[in-house]
Image (cartoon, rainbow, N blue to C red):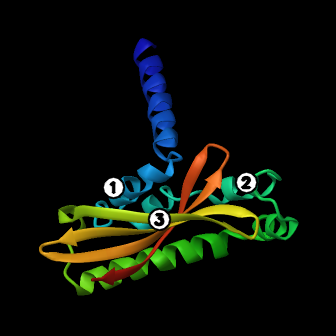
């Protein structure tokens, strides 16, 4: 009986840790946050990657917040977004970055952080942070674009795309 309780508590702790590991970040943390995700691109399948991105349910919840999503048109657009469209776009971006990087022979676990440049903008009544993450593999510099949306608990990752080499 005691073993079962310990297993149960351990399972709950693991679930809570998993839920809190996908956290909101502040702008100055976004580069390092995105970089940690990139370093795992070789290991993750699409489902694991999706867990790093703001969920559709969280996005829908954000769409109900008049303070964070100021334009009604944007709130309606967010509320009508389907899982197929949300996940489809995220997965397409993920696969495209992986494919482009594979052509350059990148081993994600061996990349080195260089810099993160960002700007915070209002777009259709939503506060977003658009950034470019620069990293190095061997002696060559590369970059990806990242996007975060301001949610109730801070900025949440919604996209990594547009792999480029410099």
Up the image or down, 59 lies above or below 89; here it is: above
Image-quadrant location for residue 108: bottom left
Q: Is residue 36 left or right of residue 64?
A: left
Q: CA distance from mark 1 to mark 2?
A: 25 Å
* Residue under the point 40% across and 17% down: 3
Q: Residue furthest bottom?
A: 103
- What's the mark number on residue 62? 2
Residue 6 on image: x %, y %: 42, 19
Image-quadrant location for residue 144: bottom left
* Residue under the point 57% across and 77% down: 89
* Residue behind mark 3: 118
Q: Residue furthest right?
A: 72
Q: CA distance from mark 3 to mark 2?
A: 22 Å
Residue 27 on image: x %, y %: 49, 53
Crowd tier of the residue under label 3, counting other residues whose Cα lies within 10 Å: few below 14, some 14–19, many 20 or above: some
Instruction: Label 3, secondary structure: give it.
Output: strand
- Whichever of labels 3 and 1 marks the residue nearer the N terminus, that label is 1
- Closest to the observer, 89 or 114: 114
* Residue under the point 37% across and 63% down: 116
- What's the mark number on residue 36? 1
* Residue under the point 72% across and 70% down: 82
Q: Is residue 112 left or right of residue 149?
A: left
- Whichever of labels 1 and 2 marks the residue nearer the N terminus, that label is 1
């Amino acid at each position: 009986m005691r073993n079962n309780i310990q297993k149960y508590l351990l399972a709950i702790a693991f679930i809570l840790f998993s839920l809190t590991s996908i956290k909101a970040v502040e702008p100055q943390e976004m580069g390092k946050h995105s970089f940690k995700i990139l370093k795992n691109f070789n290991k993750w399948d699409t489902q694991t990657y999706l867990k790093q991105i703001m969920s559709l349910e969280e996005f829908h919840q954000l769409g109900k917040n008049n303070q964070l999503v100021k334009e009604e048109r944007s709130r309606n657009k967010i509320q009508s977004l389907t899982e197929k469209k949300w996940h489809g776009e995220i997965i397409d971006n993920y696969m495209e970055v992986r494919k482009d990087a594979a052509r350059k022979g990148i081993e994600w676990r061996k990349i080195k952080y260089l810099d993160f440049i960002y700007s915070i903008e209002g777009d259709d009544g939503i506060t977003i942070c658009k950034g470019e993450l620069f990293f190095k593999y061997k002696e060559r510099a590369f970059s990806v674009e990242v996007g975060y949306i301001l949610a109730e608990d801070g900025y949440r990752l919604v996209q990594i795309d547009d792999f480029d080499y410099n």
